[in-house]
Image: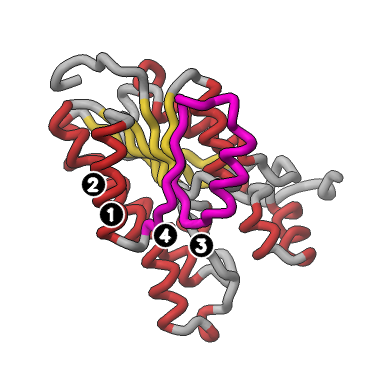
Amino acid sequence: MTGSARTHEPTILVTGGASGIGRATVEAVLAQGWKAIVADRDAAGLNLLRETLRPAAGKVIYEQMDVADEAAVIATIARCDAEFGPISGVVNSAGVGKDVPALETSADLFREILGVNLIGTFVVSREIARVMRSRGWGSIVNIASVSALRGIVGRAAYGASKGGIVTLTKVMAVELAPFGVRVNAIAPGPIETPMALDMHTAEIRAAWLATVPQRRYGSPKEVASAAIFLLNEAESSFVTGHTLTVDGGFSIAGILGGTPGP
């Protein structure tokens, strides 16, 4: 590690932290005894989480922030780093998605999904990396998707945005390695989140269960556990530029035998 040794307890920024994988990550961060900055554009979701996590007062702050708003991201990160940090890690979990066939996908929808998922991840990562670089340590974890690794119907825009995250992760990992900053990604498979409930019809769920070797959806906690591993320098200090699949074997499966379980 370059730079001076850490003297503060880890402080982790989680975007999209009010629900789904982001919320599970916030809970996992607090379970480690670390501090959490919960960023989300959903004010109601933030308020609900604040009520739920009230016993963690002093360990967590809540920021209404849209990752697609560059000025807001820059200002929020600078303020949180100065007042609550230093920020030692980030999990870029904010995201949107739609299942729409490519030929029915408008350019506006494509731009919207890229703006949040890819450009939002980039801007947050860039701003975090600027403060981490000066200190000589830090971990950036980007939530991608198996849609970045496989051609999944209806995912032209969503898959392209997540594929961009995988490439962004590799490039930033190489550029930031000399400064002691690690950048990795997680590619979840089907996970029981509010987004999945919105996007996955009964037919889509049946298709996932038929092609995931473990024959089930994953839980947000299982993705959060992977994020904690990548954030924890004591456990993953020589891991950078990697995309870790958390998908029940979906991305490596061949012909499956048997029938789906319950």
The answer to whether mark 3 and mark 4 are in CB contact below 8 A is yes
User: Residue 158: percent from the left, percent from the top?
Assistant: 49, 65
Instruction: Using the numbered discs, state the Cα–Cα distance from disc 4 to disc 2 in whole angstroms.
Output: 16 Å
Q: What secondary structure is marked by label 3?
A: loop
C-alpha span from label 1 to label 3: 16 Å
Q: Secondary structure at mark 1?
A: helix
Answer whether labels 1 and 2 touch (C-beta < 8 Å): yes
Q: Which residue is mark 4?
A: 117
Q: Which residues are magenta?
A: 39-67
Q: Is residue 55 magenta?
A: yes
Residue pointed to by mark 3: 96
Please tell me the numbered disc located at residue 225.
none
Disc 1 from disc 2: Cα separation: 6 Å
Q: Is residue 254 above or below residue 49?
A: below
Q: Amino acid at mark 1?
A: Val
Q: Earlier in the sequence, mark 1 or mark 4?
A: 4
Q: Would you call the spot at circle 4 few (<14 residues within 10 Å), some (14-19), or many (20 or more)?
A: many
Q: How many marks overall? A: 4
Q: Position of residue 73 (x, y in %)?
A: 30, 53
Which of label 4 and label 2 is nearer to you?
A: 2
